[in-house]
Amino acid sequence: MANVYKNVPFDLTTSAAFDVYTCPSNATAIIQNIQAFNVDSSAVSCFVRMKDASDSLTVIPLAAKSIAASLSAKLNDGIIILEASDVLQLQTNSAIDKVSGSVNILEISRSDQNG
């Protein structure tokens, strides 16, 4: 097993759902923090979702936060676990090019060796 910390930056350039991170097929990922910054002069709503690979990529809502103008916010209230091939998505209500940030992830890969 290998543990790798990752910092995945994002810039939401559309109001459509954006795939921020896909867990590798040989790993589990622990999302520790999703930090977002609103560069706009009005509040923006952000939504966190997971596409569940074990359930035909069903989209599961995880969190929703409003970020006030020119402020940052932590989007997740607790850790989020992604299993193999699950996808972390972010979306805003209407803002384009107004929210950016980063996701802090601990990726735990399974060993390819037996025993």
Image (tube, grey):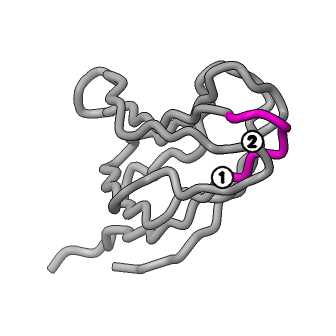
- Residues tagged 1 and 2 counted as in contact (Cβ below 8 A): yes
Q: Which residues are magenta?
A: 36-43
Mark drawn on residue 36: 1
Q: Secondary structure at mark 2?
A: strand
Amino acid at circle 1: Ala
Question: On the rendered image, what quadrant is the N terminus found in?
Answer: bottom left
Measured from the top left, where is residue 56 in percent x and y?
29, 21
Foreground pick, 47 / 69? 69
Asked if the magenta segment contains residue 87, the reply would be no
- Residue displayed at 40% across by 42% down: 85
Predominant secondary structure, magenta span? loop
Query: In the rendered image, which quarter is residue 113 located in?
Result: bottom left
Q: Which residue is mark 2?
A: 99
Above/below status of 46 relative to 113 = above
Badge 1: how crowded within 10 Å, few (<14), some, or many (20+)? many
- Measure the alpha-carbon separation of dots 1 and 2: 6 Å
Q: Which mark is residue 90?
A: none
